[in-house]
Image (cartoon, coloured by chain):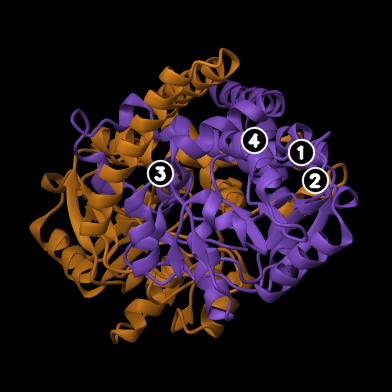
Chain colours: A purple, B orange
Amino acid sequence: MGCSLGLALKKGGHIITGVDHNPLHLEQAESIGAIDKARELNDALADAELVVIGVPVDATVRILPQVLDSMPENATVMDLGSTKLEICNSLKNHPRRGIFVPVHPMAGVEHSGPLAAHVDLYINAKVIICEPQKSSYQSLNVVLGILQELKMRAIFMDTEDHDRQLALVSHLPQIMAYALASMGDFDLAANKQWVELGGGGLQSSIRLGKSDANMWMPIFQQNKNNILEYIDNYLNQLTALRKLIVEDDHVALSENIARANHNYEKLNYRQNKIKKSVEMQQGSFKVFYS
Amino acid sequence: MGCSLGLALKKGGHIITGVDHNPLHLEQAESIGAIDKARELNDALADAELVVIGVPVDATVRILPQVLDSMPENATVMDLGSTKLEICNSLKNHPRRGIFVPVHPMAGVEHSGPLAAHVDLYINAKVIICEPQKSSYQSLNVVLGILQELKMRAIFMDTEDHDRQLALVSHLPQIMAYALASMGDFDLAANKQWVELGGGGLQSSIRLGKSDANMWMPIFQQNKNNILEYIDNYLNQLTALRKLIVEDDHVALSENIARANHNYEKLNYRQNKIKKSVEMQQGSFKVFYS
C-alpha cells in the first residue's frame, strides 16, 4: 500500500522518505522508485510535512502517539488502516489529535511487499475519511489535496459505522477465503488432480487466501464483534442453503438464488456506475481496484 | 456456453445450427453470429455430424436418449455439463452409447444467455473428457479434433472422480457465493452505504452469485452427496476459524492463515504453469478463463 502511494506521489513531484523495520523492503522500495531515500523514523519525522502510516493496525495504535508527539508544527499524519474505531479511540485525548486524519483507501491487492506495488492502484478508488470533524481544517485539506491528486473519491463516515460496514464488505470475504484455502481438502500432497481443474470460480473465491496474516490478524482482533456477527449471519445462510439441498427443496432454493442474483445485480449496477477503471496482471492472479 | 462455442467454430469455417426452446435466444444467437440458422431439434438432428448439448444437466439427462436415437449413423454427440455421473449412468445400457462423448469445458462466465458469449472463451481452457473407453474411436476423434481446434487442453477422468473433484473446486465456491449474496445484510433497501464500500475483495467473493438457478440447481441435485460433504468440511473450517477469533488464539489462527497462504501459493504456481491467457471485460465484472 505504501509503495503504491510512493510511486504515484513521486510521479506527481513529491519527495518521499521511506521508513521500515525491514531493510530489504527499503532497498526494494528504492529500487522500484517508490521512495527518494530511506531514513530512521525520528529522523524522518523531524522535517516531514505529511506522514503516511501504512503498517498493520495494531502497530498503528502503538506508534501513532509517538509520531504525533514528534511531528513538526503544521505537519499532518494520515494512516491507511482497515479498522478505525480502536485507532481513533486511542488518540481521543491526545493534544495533537487535530493533525491526524484517519484514512482508509478501498484499494489493495492480495500480494504484499514493495514488489507488489502498482502506480495506478489508487486511481478512481473510493477512500474513507473518518470523523473529519476531529481533524483540523489544515490537515484535512492537506489530505484531501493528496487524495484528489491521486484521483480518489472521498467518503466521510463515523468510525463505528466504518468498522461495522467494513466487517461485511471486506473482513467477512477475507475470512471466507482463509477458511476455503486452509481446508485440508486443498492439501496438495493428498490431492493432486483437483488443482488441474480449478477454474475461474475457484480462483476468485480463494484469491484473498494469499493475504498476509500480519496485516489481517490485528484487523480481526480490533473489529472482532462486528466480524463475528457477520460470520454468524453467513454461517446461518450457508447452513440454510445446505438444508435446502439436503431436502431437495427446489422452490426455496431457487428463491434464495433469485435473491442472490438480485443483490448481485444491484451491487454490480452500483459498482459499475461508481467504478471507472479495472486492471489485471497478465499471467498472475488479478489486481482489482474499484 | 453454446454461443461461445458457436462463435469460435463458425470462425473456423464450420456450419452451425442452433436449437433452443427460447426464440429470443435463437434470434440473439443469429444476430451475434454464433449460429448460421435456427431449426427444430428433430429437423436439426437429421443431418448433423456433431451435436453439442449445452443445457442444464437435468435436461441433458432427459433429452440425451432421444438425441442418440435420432442421430444419423457415424454422427457424434457431446455435452457440456458440469456433472457427469448421472448423465453417463443414464446411458449405460443405451445401444448407441459409443457415439456420445461426455465433455466438461472448464470455462465459463457468471453471465448467461447468448449476449454473454465470447469467441475466445475456450482458448487454453482445460476440458475434461469422462470415461473415454466407452466412446467409439471415431466419436472420440471427432470431439478431440474440435477441442484441439478450440485450443483447449484435454484431461481424461472417471465420472465419479470428476463429480467428486468438481464438487470441491467449482460447486463449493458456487454455493459459498450464493450464501454470501443472498444474506439479508446485502438487501440494499435496508443497507444503503455499504454498497459504496465494496471493493475487489467483495467483488471476487460475490461474483458467482450472479449465476443462473436453472443451471445450478440440477448440478446441486445430481452431485448432492459430494457437495454436502465439502460444504460440511467448509462449515467446519470456518467455524474453527471463528472460534480462534473468539478466543484470541493468534498462534493457531496464524497457523491456519499460513496454511491458506501455502495452499494458495501452490495452487497459483500450478495455475500459472497451466494457464496461458486471461482476459476481462472492462467496465463490468470479469470474464475468467483458465
State whether residue B222 is above or below residue A263: above
Q: Look at the numbered disc 4 and give the secondary structure of its residue.
A: helix
Q: Position of residue A29 (x, y in %)?
A: 40, 62
The amino acid pointed to by label 2 is Arg
In the rendered structure, find residue A61 and report the number of the disc placed on it: 4
Q: Measure the alpha-carbon separation of dots 3 and 1.
A: 28 Å
Q: Residue at x 39, y 35 (%)?
A: A181
> Which residue in the protein does label 1 denote?
A88
Disc nearer the start of the sequence (4/1)? 4
Q: Position of residue A277 (x, y in %)?
A: 60, 73
Q: Look at the numbered disc 2 and give the secondary structure of its residue.
A: loop
Please state which of residues B65 and B132 is positioned toward the viewer in this rendering.
B132
The amino acid pointed to by label 4 is Val
Q: Quadrant of residue A46?
A: bottom right
Q: Residues within 10 Å of mark 3 (few under 14, many from 20)?
A: many
- Residues indicated by labels 3 and 2 sit on the same polypeptide chain: yes
State whether residue A123 is above or below residue A71: below
> Which residue in the protein does label 3 denote?
A210
Q: Measure the alpha-carbon separation of dots 4 and 1.
A: 9 Å
Give me the chain letter of mark 4.
A
Q: Residue furthest right?
A: A133
Q: Look at the numbered disc 3 and give the secondary structure of its residue.
A: helix
Q: Is residue B20 left or right of residue A32?
A: right
> Which residue in the protein does label 2 denote?
A96
Residue B15 visible to the viewer: yes
CB under 8 Å between discs 3 and 2: no
